[in-house]
Amino acid sequence: MSVTQTGLKGAARSVCVGWRDMVSQIRDAAELSSQLHGIDGKGYGAYKSISGKYRVGDFILCIDYVQGDPYAAPSKLRVQLDMETAGFPLDIYGNIDRKVGLEDYLLRAFDWFISREVKGHRGSGKSGLIAVDSPGQEVIQRTGVKVSPSRVEVRLVAGLPARGRRVLGYQAEKMLLGELPRVAQGALFYSRLNADNLWRFVLNKENSAELRRELCRRKAVAFVADRAILPRRSGISEEPMSTAQAVPFESPPSLRTEIPLANGGSVSGMLIPEGVTLIVGGGYHGKSTLLDALDRGIYDHVPDDGRERVVTLPQAVKIRAEDGRQVTGVDISFFISDLPNSVDTTAFWTPSASGSTSQAANIMEALEMGAEVLLVDEDTSATNFMVRDMRMQKLVSSDREPITPFIDRVRQLYEEKGVSTVLVVGGSGDYFDVADTVIMMDHYRPVDVTRRARAIAKENPTGRVRESAARLGGVRHRYPDPKSIDPTRKGKVRIRDRGLTTVEFGSENIELDQVEQLVDVSQTRAVGQIIEYARKYLPECSIREALQRVEEDLDEQGLDIISPFSGHPGDFARPRMMEVAAALNRLRSLRLLQGR
């Protein structure tokens, strides 16, 4: 539809009027100071009067939401700086990878300056708090900092000071007009940051993302760089183990390749090809450590993390048994059929799955969402799902065993669907018969033992019989009933995280402690909101179609669109739709539309 010249002029006038209105609403810092002095000693509710926008030196301070109580969730603020003043060159955020890298770096810088400049506790409850959504070792798209050609914006929270429930106005002035501007001065000007460190951080993010894209071109599922440090500091820390303790990774010559980096130079390391790959070795030799690095390889990492050059295809999924989980209408017949009492496994439902049925459901749900690689550790798998040896086959005949074990399906997944598998196995050499590549971890160093494994398999036949040759066929897509996805509780929408592993969704708690590729509580926070956002695409769309549309919306409009707080979505990190689907599948109220 064409737009007339008159319409263009009218639109321009409207934009100009809107801009003048916005500017006229920005008050001076002196007015904020006067207000804070005036409400000193009054009831905490008096803080509501300071909501608005203020010019504080080079910055605009936006007080978007004021908490109702010093013990309540803290107030929501934004700090804005004109990009021309901030001085960041366009090419440092000129594509999505660099933009995400710059935003992540600035968020870390702001967090560091908070630790240096902010006094902290100033009274009751959260008084004196200034905080941003602090990142971990992964570099993930977040809402804490927003960079555009026009400005830089930081979203943060603050605990406005009080003694009991009385306003400490002069202390608030020190926070908002003293400490916060000093933090922003240190973190948001290109000229005041270490340019070498900043560029190194941003280009590291771009190099890792491009390295991951290179996997498709080389028909590979993962890459692990030489000299990578795979072990973590401890079971509760994702920081790298010290180089004095860790054994640096060194690729076996037969799997080593050299890959050019996007910004010059190259990196050598182990390329894991498509197909079925086994990771074998003795206990405590590094098998699970390697797999853990691969399942985190779907994310980019900060420089010097040790895993910054460990990358995996973006749709790689960690699969495990998950006793007790909800399963809703999943076709698991590829693995399990002919259950007693004529239970239908083409649309399997249970409120409490067993180890084998849960692992089968986890695989089929991943395939439904377009999984490219399955990452499996026998330590967290159901034994009867993984393999049945010859002796057990002779004792329990196939007509009495409803499970077709994974060993008889893993090659089909690759040959029929192009889905590769990387499997840690330490107790069953039967898998040698179906493997394309076998990597042995020996004192934390990988050795290519593929030829030796094939020779052993040939010399020592297992005698087991393949249990089924039925084709996988199409993966069933499910259509949720929107009425079963209800985020309300007592008439109000209630969606929030309960730490990394739980989403409170209306009257339900979605338990995600076995969904291992969620790595940040801000992702968990976003998962619940994305499920709510996706409801608008139901019931016309299947789960996958709805989440694909959400993905497109997030790509085009950003993560802000899922926030219930207009203008201040400061605490979300972007999850994959794979993990959003996993959460939806674990929503115990979920029901499917009949006949679809």
Image (cartoon, helix red, strand yellow):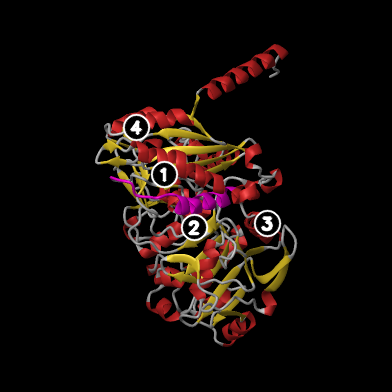
- Residue under the image location 30 percent in, 31 percent down: 45
Image side of residue 345 versus residue 255, left or right: left
Q: How many marks?
A: 4
Whether pointer 1 and pointer 4 mark residues with C-beta atoms closer than 8 Å, the reply is no
Mark 4 lies on a secondary structure that is helix
Quadrant of the snapshot with the N terminus: top right
- Amino acid type at circle 3 is Glu
Span of residues in magenta: 103-124
Which callout, 1 or 4, points to the residue nearer the camera? 4
Above or below, 426 against 142 in this view is: below
Please name the residue that numbered disc 1 is placed on: 528
Distance of label 3 from label 1 (alpha carbons)? 30 Å
Q: Is residue 515 on the magenta stretch?
A: no
**Where does the image place residue 339, in percent across and percent down from the top left?**
36, 60
Please name the residue that numbered disc 2 is placed on: 136
Please name the residue that numbered disc 3 is placed on: 210
Image side of residue 372 versus residue 6, left or right: left
- The numbered disc on residue 47 is 4
Going from N to C along the chain, the mark reached first, 3 or 1, is 3
